[in-house]
Image (spheres, rainbow, N blue to C red):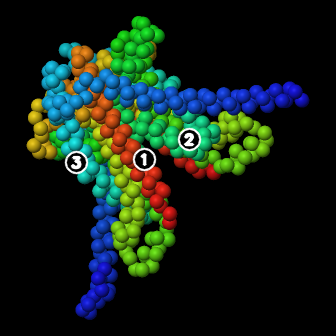
Amino acid sequence: MSAMRAGVERRKLLDKLFVVLGLLVLFAALAVLLTLFLDLVRQGAPRLNLDFVTSYASRKPEQAGILAAWVGTSLIMVVTACVAMPVGVAAAIYLEEYAPRNWITAVIEINVTNLAGVPSIIYGLLALGLFVYKFSLGQSILAAGLTLALLILPIVIVATREAVRAVPRPIREAAYALGATRWEVTAHHVLPYSMGGVLTGMIIGLSRAIGETAPIITIGALSFIAFLPESLLDPFTAMPIQMFNWVSRPDPGFRVNAAAAGAILLGMTLLMNGIAIWLRYRFRKRMNW
Amino acid sequence: MTTPASPAPLWKSIRRRRVRDRVIESLLLLAGLVAVFTTVAIVWILVAEALPFFDHVSFADFLTDTMWTPLFAEPRYGILPLVAGTLVTTFVALALAIPAGTIIAIYLSEFASHRLRELVKPVLEMLGAVPTVVYGYFALVMVTPFLQKLIPSLPGFNMLSAGLVIGIMIVPYVASVSEDAMRAVPNYMREGSYAMGATRLQTATRVVVPGALSGIAAAYILGISRAVGETMIVAVAAGLQPNLTWNPTESAATITAFIVQVSLGDLPHDSIGYQSIFAAGLVLLVVTLAFNVAGFMLTRRFREAY
């Protein structure tokens, strides 16, 4: 009997040990995130001031700033949002509300899944060949915005589909019963009710796009720009490009700049993700059909 | 929408709305087809731009030559060094991400309280959302100096540090896909196991994990595909010199790092350097596509299991 008791005790101990291990790994992961952010802020602290945000890039690290970078990033994000939002939402609505069960639908679904797994630098090569040369958009803000829009399209589509699917069937049926057409059901009922989920997906998508570096390097973003773009066809730089340029220089002064730019970039990404999580939480709480 | 005051017949309004519905439906379908066009465009552009490259370089040389020096006076075009760099960083990343991700998934799915799970998952999500260039900085400026204390001979650029940070980046991904698979295991299977006197850990390792195996395998495979395609971390921290080695403490370029390196220079459209990044990109696409298809088929299988 005591042998069995010992076996039970041992198994219970193993159970407890696993809980400790699980918590340890979990908190190690969270500690990385915290360390990373705090260290960026600490290292970048000397440059985290208003001058940094209002100066152009410079050969002297202590005079360099991110003006052209954040203006470039903002314009790119506007283009990305304007393209990804309508196309992504429309595609999701088609797949959820309209699509018949046929091979076209199957092909679209497979492609959306597949595109989510294509490395971002491949999108950069696509954009270089297609937007920059074939469409002659040049190494411009417009080309970068379109590229990132394609990149986040699967994210927006998946998030919108989930939100649309969460709208209960009876709401649609009630609308149909009153004689609404399919589009009226979608536009007057399904879409407004799923707006929270759509918005969340859009913010998550943009937070991914804002930090993407590889595809816009491939297009040919410049790292030294001392003017602000006047049109969407102008050459550009962006926050992650600026940071990459600074981090790859040996001069320690530029490392400080890289840390400061990184702190701002990471801060923006975390803020956008935080907003998305909060929105999701709020909408989930408010929904009681 | 408005009630017709004059005898504008009802059927006219119905027909107008039906026509509008048809037009809108085609527009929505068009948006859905953008995904298909994008895939086609990716394959088309990569193949079309890489083809002239293979006029200069034979396919056999490309796959078997052990040197990759396209920007030298006497260029050699063997993809092997880049593939080796990619495999080494991926392997290091998986050595970290698979155990850590699996432990987190088991803990969150089988042990954690509902409240803890709701609290932790968003934070994990944020770990996966950190811009990769920031992770690159982390690898170069924080992880490498730390590793140099343990391995004094470690060079400033090395695949070990880059691989470890890629691992950190894909932990949330591996964890969340595996957790989804574990949560799809029906509760009666757990209850059966508990009824036989098994502890939580025994239930987790002998019932839940085997039951969710194809889903967990899919998580690993999708993680691999992420690691293979990761660009900025290796471009910043692993070095840009192609180097045929299997030793993670050396510096070496990956396929992705090479594409970045060439893109940073301003190469003319028709040069062989320009074409070479599309050839490298094609290899990358084929590799990630193979993993994605395998992962996709596995997730499908585990969905059908119950």
For label 3, count other residues whose C-alpha is less than 10 Å away and answer few (under 14), some (14-19) or many (20+). many
C-alpha distance separating marks 1 and 2: 15 Å
Q: Which of marks 1 and 3 is in front?
A: 1
Residue A277's disc number: 1
Residue type at mark 3: give it: Val
The furthest residue to the top: B153
Kindly indicate whether the residues beneath marks 3 and 2 are on one polypeptide chain. no
Q: Mark 3 lies on which chain?
A: A
Write the residue at 46% across / 63% down: A167
Residue A21, percent from left and from top:
60, 28
Res B194 quadrant in image:
top right
Residue A64, percent from left and from top:
17, 25
The reply to whether residue B256 is visible in this rendering is no
Q: Is residue B112 left or right of residue A28?
A: right
Write the residue at 39% across / 14% down: B145
Residue A79's disc number: 3
For label 2, count other residues whose C-alpha is less than 10 Å away and answer few (under 14), some (14-19) or many (20+). few
Q: Mark 1 lies on which chain?
A: A
The quarter in which the N terminus of chain B is drawn is: bottom left
The reply to whether residue A87 is visible in this rendering is yes
Residue A88, percent from left and from top:
33, 54
Residue A109, percent from left and from top:
42, 53
Q: Which of marks 3 and 2 is in front?
A: 2
Residue type at mark 2: give it: Leu
Write the residue at 69% across / 32% down: A15
Residue B155 to residue B17: above or below: above
Residue type at mark 1: give it: Ile
Residue B116's disc number: 2
C-alpha distance separating marks 1 and 3: 24 Å
Q: Nearer the viewer, residue B120 or B288?
A: B120
Q: Earlier in the sequence, mark 1 or mark 3?
A: 3
